[in-house]
Image (cartoon, helix red, strand yellow):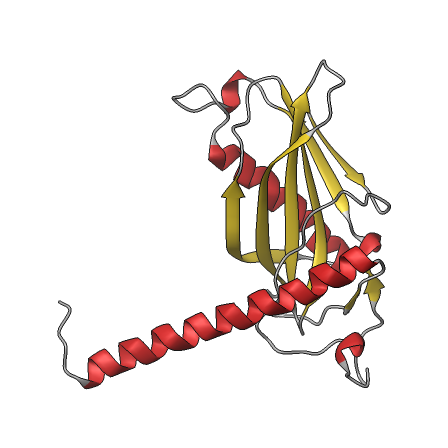
Amino acid sequence: MTKLVNRSQDESSPEGGGAPEDGTRTPREGGDGVGELPGKPTEASRTTLSHIMTGSDTNLLGTVHGGVIMKLVDDAAGAVAGRHSGGPAVTASMDEMVFLEPVRVGDLVHVRAQVNWTGRSSMEVGVRVMAERWNESTPAQQVGSAYLVFAAVDADGRPRPVPPVIPGTERDKRRHQEAQIRRTHRLARRRAIKELREKRAADGIDES
C-alpha cells in the first residue's frame, strides 16, 4: 500500500535538489520580482510518499529492485512539482540517484521530497529515501537520495511559468545555495562536452 501525505513541517525531509537551467532569478537572489508569480514557501509542497516493500518488488539478489525505488522517487518528486507549480509537471531529467543501503522485503520506505530551486518553468526537486522495518519501532535510516528536474507544462504541453520557491529555514536556505552550485557544475559540464565535440568535428575526426 502506498500513502502520500503532505509533510509541511517535516524537518528531516530531503537534502534538496539542484537548479534548473533557464536562468531565472528569484526575488531572494536579487531580482525585482516584476512580472513574476507570487513566491511559495518550501514547506507548502513538501511531501512524503510511504510504501511497504513486498516480494513483487525484489531483484535477483532478493533485495528491492533499484527501479522500484526510482519510481517511488519520481512519483514523490512529481507530486511536489505539481503542488508547487499548481498544475501538470513532467520529469525532464534525473540529475543524480544514489543508493546508500539495500532495501529489503518488509521495509517501510518513506520518500521525502521538496522543491529547492526554481527557474522560469522548471523546478529541481530533492529527494531523501528512508527505510524502517514495518513491524519494528527502530529509527528509519537513509537508504538513498536523488535530484530531479521537472518542467511545468500547460494543457498543450508547452512550458508555463512557476512560482519562485522561498526557503523558510536555515536548512532550506542551505539547500537552495547548494542547488545553485550543482546548477553551475551542470552547465559547465555541458559547455565542456559541447566544446570538445565541436573541436573534434573541426579536426575532422571520424567516429563512424
Q: Quadrant of the C terminus?
A: bottom left
The residue located at (52%, 54%) in the rendering is 94
Residue that protrudes farthest toward the top in the picture: 135
Give x and y (percent) for residue 185: 51, 69
Q: Using residue 197 as the reference point, say whether residue 84 is left or right of it.
A: right
Quadrant into which the N terminus falls? top right
Instruction: Name the residue rendered at 43%, 70% in the picture.
Output: 189
What residue is at 65 percent from the left and 63 percent from the top?
A: 178
Please say if 189 is above or below 170. Answer: below
- Spot occupied by residue 102 in the image (x, y as percentages of width and height): 52, 28
Instruction: Note whether residue 150 is visible.
Output: yes
Residue appearing at x 81%, y 82% in the figure: 33
Residue 85 visible to an observer of this rendering: no
**Number of on-image labels:** 0
Residue 204 is situated, as x and y percent measured from the top left of the image, at 14, 82
For residue 10, what is the image quadrant? top right
> Where's residue 111, x and y in %?
67, 38
Q: Quadrant of residue 152?
A: bottom right
> Which one is in front, 172 or 109?
172
